[in-house]
Amino acid sequence: MSGAAEEADSPPTHMSEDSPGSSSSGGSGGGRRTPDLRGGDNGGGPRASSSSSSAPPDQVLDNVLESVLEFLTAARDRNAASLVCRSWYRAEAQTRRELFIGNCYAVDPRRAVARFRAVAAVVLKGKPRFADFSLLPDGWGANVKPWLEALGPAYPCLERICLKRMTVTDDDLGLVARSFPGFQELSLVCCDGFSTLGLAVIAEGCRHLRVLDLIEDYVDQEDEAVDWISKFPVSNTSLESLMFDCVGAPFNFEALEALVARSPSLRRLRVNHHVSVEQLRRLMARAPQLTHLGTGAFRPEAPQGEGMSVSELAPSFAASTSIVCLSGFQEVNPEYLPAIYPVCGNLTSLNVSFASLTAEDLTPVIRQCHKLQTFWVLDTVGDEGLRAVAETCSDLRELRVFPLDATEDSDGSVSDVGLQAISEGCRKLESILYFCQRMTNAAVVAMSNNCPDLVVFRLCIMGRHRPDRITGEPMDDGFGAIVKNCKKLTRLSVSGLLTDKAFAYIGQYGKLIKTLSLAFSGNSDLSLQFLFEGCTRLQKLEVRDSPFSDRGLLCGLDYFYNMRFLWMNSCRLTMRGCREVAQRMPNLVVEVMEEQNEDKVETETVDKLYLYRSLAGPRGDAPPLVKIL
Amino acid sequence: MAGLGFEETELRLGLPGGSNEAEEAAAAVRSSGKRGYAETIDLVLKLEPASAAAPPSEDDEEVADGVAEAQPSPAAADGQLKRSPSQCSVVTAAQPDADPEKPRAPKAQAVGWPPVRSFRRNMLAATAERGGAALVKVSMDGAPYLRKVDMGTYKSYQELSKALEKMFSSFTIGNDCSQAQGMTGMNESKLVDLLNGSDYVPTYEDKDGDWMLVGDVPWEMFVASCKRLRIMKGSEAIGLAPRAMEKCKSRS
């Protein structure tokens, strides 16, 4: 988790490895820990130290080394240091505070725990990203339990756990509460498997809890939801962050109000849709020091007209002078938007991407957000609304435009016009995610020229194989310009009509690309060959519905060990090709996911392939639909 | 699915990038936002009718798409080697001509495409259900294209009628303003006004699929049950809106 991600702080950039400035796959919470320069025993955990005052020379060196290594926070740097020699390896292992595991199946938890003795924070990632799009079978895996069972005994002083795309049950949460008495921060992103029962156990059991961030999780709805908010003990007054907008269950509002009132350090609060605007006002009165506010539904208690007026709500925002990040607005009536005007001038982050707002609704807000750096919005804002953004938000770093109607034949309200406008007004843009139906190479080229700082470029032309809407040509040149001109690019998602030429460009120029997503693109296996041979830093490749066969897959043999994973679905792979990869690469786990077919005929075609490097060998928890070759 | 696989590995001419996997692997089932594998199962079993039927009346914009989609049909109809008989018959049984009254069947959708997180899809759907955006198609007989309105942005029949008037004013024949008639349902008369005695009647399709006259029920109930709007020619509306017809006639 890089420090940059936390500063930008719109939900799923949390734990993203793409934030500009992150030097590696996850640093630690940069600079948060002051190194212990006491020398001698760092108190960092069990060590085999000789205790006499005249310590042998290498003991002294070890102490010095450890003190120095404390300054290294980025995992990549630490990995490099650990390879120097045995004593550096040991010293590094003793001083690593944050353990980052990008693929929970890449290493056995017991092995990780045996090496690193003094860990205070663990970051674990589980399922491949395409799980978010319903492409992974149910019960695929990524259960956190085996990890917790290893972490518990090894790190009783563990303070922080961050999980992304993992299955976490209520029992697992109970294990967390029991295993780590000093536990402080729990962050669950895109996880599933737990319910309010588990949340109650955490709230009650982790007496020193400071952070509970639930971000885009699928929380099981039980018949009788537990009022977990009331379970925070009265003695807990150290809460700093509480985000639960994805928890659909209702809760006792008074308990929340009391909790907020006794938490003077609370900076981040994101509530769910059960909080009305009147209740929000009460919360804001209790916590004027908030920096991040998620407003929930932002609707009045009474359905029509009799609720609070805008003029009654605005003073609450006027009083919250520290707010820099606003989100929520899930059921907002546009008439209430003026209430937020008082904070617009301070906002660096605004997320209205769950609210269907037009340019007319939003422009008055946008025009006041001069300092905006992160903006998430629905395409209902239209090219016109994006123009307003371009004219006002010259400091914009991250833009995400989501489709209200996420289907291929939807109208799509933004186009190349909006993209061009943004590129002209927001020159400092670093990250963009843009869903549209109509795009031109010219607009993409313009962005490549106007926004040289782009690190993340994700363009989704929703209709499959759509060419340039004006010239009718493939989108090769547009994406080619992006990889050529945006020299800092590390993440790319392509779409539209694309031939092998596009991938020739990407292979030629995309030397820093770490994450690449393709769908419905390319002509032939040449595309894959260009990618594997050209993108030397490639770590994560996701491919779907493209005409790549075993031949293309085998082009990657020399490169798979340098990658975290490869995902391919609905291409032209066969069992033969996948078996060959599995045979020739012993440290790769090759998973093939079967189509469930009524004939139960063993097929040669492979619909889903997920392969990843691993020191742990084939996992034992795969469901029947997953075959490990 | 044996049939699919051999299909995919055979040589075939196609447009650059016009890969057929999508169409073949795609499903008729629009992603319901449900997570998990169940969808891909439905997907495979239901695939042919939708893709084979790819209605020729697709958007002109999607020319490349349309052509690419035409590819699977002839090939599939050949009854490929390992394709099971049941699949063959599913393929060759073409969709009947779409009833012009009913909304066209959606083009075959691929699972998880566009790549919007299920979480987000569910959230937006839930919000819409709870009373957020409720986009509804509006058609007017004789107009060359349809429009969409967000029912959530209007608070009454009056607001809706004003908006519709703005949208379709270029298409109405004759703009004679006539006085509102009587007090039998203020809502109704406003709407008839809207259409300026040009013989149009606003109707809507409700949750049950029935076509109803706009204006009979309280506004909130209308918004909750309205799936689609259609501004019908008066001559077709006889069964639906006898009173409206009489008003039109009596005025002119």
Image (spheres, coloured by chain):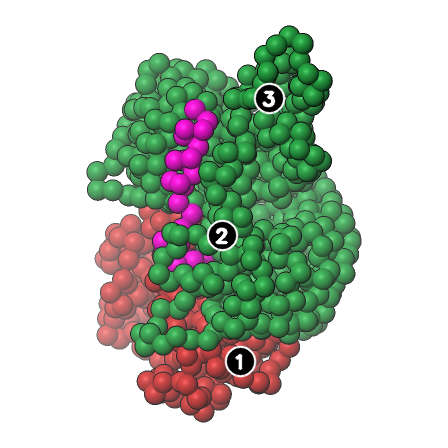
Chain colours: A green, B red
| Residue situated in front as seen by the camera: A67 or A297 | A67
Return the x and y of residue A101 as percentages of the image width and height.
53, 41
Given this view, does label 3 or label 2 mark the residue nearer the observer?
A: 2
In the rendered image, which residue does mark 2 sit on?
A617
The amino acid on which the numbered mark 3 sits, given as a three-letter code, is Arg
Mark 1 vs 2: CB contact within 8 A: no
Q: CA distance from mark 3 to mark 1?
A: 56 Å
Residue A154 in magenta stretch: yes
The amino acid on which the numbered mark 2 sits, given as a three-letter code, is Gly
Q: Residue at x 68, y 67 (%)?
A: A529
- Labels 3 and 2: the sequence-earlier one: 3
Secondary structure at badge 1 equals helix
In the rendered image, which residue does mark 3 sit on?
A33
- Magenta-highlighted residues: A132-156
In the rendered image, which residue does mark 1 sit on?
B9
Residue B234 in magenta stretch: no
| Residue situated in front as seen by the camera: A35 or B100 | A35
